[in-house]
Amino acid sequence: MFLLALLAAFILNQGDRVVVGSVEAVESVRNRWVSETHWPSRGWMYKLFSIPVKTGSFDRHAELAYFVALLPILDDGITHRINFDGVLQTDRTPAQYERLYELYRERQSGVLGRLERLEPPPRLRAIHERILKATAEQIRFYERFMRAKAQSPSLDLRNMLGDPSLQSTNAELHAAWEEIRRLYPRLDPLSSAAIELRFCGLDAL
């Protein structure tokens, strides 16, 4: 009983560190498992919220339909980003980095194609263009990151912060979110969280 009480007290006092450490440990294992034959679904934490279709605050059907269609596409984009980002956090040969980048590029280009086929309502076209640009720039960023990593195995994201495509992806997603907030100043909390979480998950920063 004493040991259980001690463990409970530790978790209560250090709970956030325990949870974060546990998640990081699990993700580290999953990163090592990513391969040409194993491309797991990732980013569950970014799917915690969905847009309520009946009780939400979108009052234009076309705009509601756009966001409902957008989120699953972004979920796939998040999976591809997290998987390849995880690859770059593990020790691989240059050839393995190259092959897995090509797999990421193929899949993320598929996401970009789906986004290009998604027709936004007029008010949301500028937002959609920013999402398209962010996705395209992300693919370019990870190619440069992959090549730099192959040459310098100790390199990580901190060494890539000056990359123009990384900065562009981050800026476009932030600008898209700010425009959504401007268009929908009274956006319901569930819809707001659902969209913002996806933008955060797609962003490497």
Image (spheres, grey):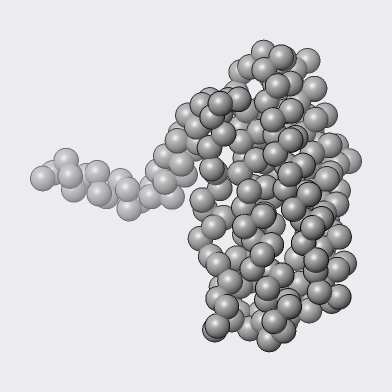
- Asked if residue 11 can be seen in this view, the reply is yes
Q: Nearer the viewer, residue 55 or 147?
A: 55
Q: Position of residue 147 (x, y in %)?
A: 80, 22
- Residue 186 in sight from this viewpoint: no
**In the figure, is residue 19 to the left or right of 163?**
left
Rendering quarter of residue 96: top right
Q: Position of residue 33 (x, y in %)?
A: 51, 26
Please determine whether, in this image, residue 118 is positioned above or below residue 153: below
200 lies left or right of 169: left
Residue 68's x, y, as percent? 64, 68
Residue at horizontal 53%, vertical 37%? 40
Q: Quadrant of the N terminus?
A: top left
Toward the bottom, the furthest residue is: 59
Residues 17 and 88: in front is 88
Compared with 69, 205 (above or below) is above
- Tell me which residue sits at (84%, 44%) in the image: 137
